[in-house]
Image (cartoon, rainbow, N blue to C red):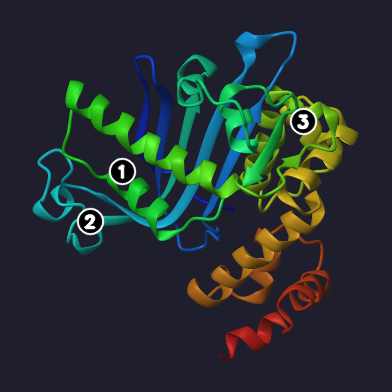
Amino acid sequence: MYDELDVLQDIERSVPGSVQYSIKRYKKHLQWSFEDTGMLVYNFEKNNPEANYLELKFCITGNVYCRSKLVECDYCKFNASKNCAEKIDSVDVLSFSFRPSYLTQFVKGKKQLDISDEVLSFSHTASFSKLLPLCNKTRKAIESLLNHPYSDTLENIFVNAQTQILLLYSMDCMLGIKEEVFTCKFLANADDREKISRAREVLLQHIGEPLTIKELSRKVAINECYLKKGFKEMFGTTIFDFYQSQRMEHAKYLLYEKGLSVTEVSLLLGYSSISHFSTAFKKHTGIKPCELLLR
């Protein structure tokens, strides 16, 4: 099973009149297998304008958190944290939420609107999400947000500037590209999307304790059918395939890094027999567990 999450940093703040944001940093464990991702979420509710928002989400691996943050080492002070001797590898999850009252200022007076203008003015009438490529410019802006020397008012000014840069790059990615509209209508609801995301977290937390779809749906309080359809649409894979992939990646870590036996790993991952585990492992990796131990 995965170790309990080690929270290195947990920030939730709001820059008045601008952006509400959260930064959560977790100590990265060797067995974790993630890909850096970015996502733009546009929420539009015609009959409830107060619920409209634009959100940018990022999950970055291979970044670092400085244990000397309170005294700010010289490396981190100049955004060179990767060279810091006090670094801890981390997984960083960032979220930036913008309200219509803030975004509409950028399109005032424009007569012809492209897709990014429609989104910023909230004249686009369908909720959608879009995966964002993480170019070097985006990564640099995120690195600056994670490791900066400012506090209080100056921090608000800095965060506001950097989030505008992230917003710029995100809008730039939308030009000429069709947005990914939710085909499952219930995903237009932010609460339902949050439940689907929570289901993914629950699966990772129970990597050695297989859950049925019914058990998982109860834990996140969503209909089984909605859970299966929503998971496939949001993450591009079925619940079973995602869970099996994560189990096998964890198995590789336990076998190769921890030196556990095939029998021990099979038991830890909840398999009823070694043969079932070996079959699943070979299907995912192309080799038998015992062959990995010989490498």
Residue type (three-letter) at the residue carrying disc 2: Ser
Task: Indicate which disc residue 187 carries.
Answer: 3
The residue at 36%/29% (across/down) is: 11
Q: Quadrant of residue 292?
A: bottom right
> Which residue is at the front of the view, 235 or 46?
46
Local secondary structure at mark 1 = helix
The label on residue 81 is 2
Q: Look at the picture and state if 140 lies above or below 293.
A: above
Nearer to us in this view, 184 or 214: 184
Front disc: 2 or 3: 3
Q: Position of residue 30 (x, y in %)?
A: 46, 63
Q: Earlier in the sequence, mark 2 or mark 1?
A: 2
- Residue 90 shows in this picture: no
Look at the numbered discs 2 and 1 and tell me whether their residues touch, using CB distance below 8 Å: yes
Q: Looking at this rendering, what residue extends furthest in the front direction?
A: 111
Furthest toward the bottom, the residue is 294
Of callouts 2 and 3, the N-terminal one? 2
On residue 146, the disc is: 1
Mark 2 and 3 residues: CB-CB less than 8 Å, in contact?
Answer: no
Cβ–Cβ below 8 Å for labels 3 and 1?
no
Q: Amino acid at mark 3?
A: Leu
Residue 286 horizontal side relative to residue 36, left or right: right
- Mark 2 lies on a secondary structure that is helix
- Residue 120 in the image, given as x and y percentages of width and height: 56, 27
Q: Percent from the top left, x then y, of residue 128?
A: 71, 35
Mark 3 surroundings: few (<14), some (14-19) or many (≥20) residues within 10 A: many
Report, in whole angstroms, how far the alpha carbon at label 2 lies from the one at label 1.
10 Å
Query: In the figure, residue 241 lies in which quadrant?
Result: bottom right
Secondary structure beneath label 3: helix
Location of the C terminus (image quadrant): bottom right
Residue positioned 78% across, 54% down in the render: 237
Residue 43 visible, this angle: yes
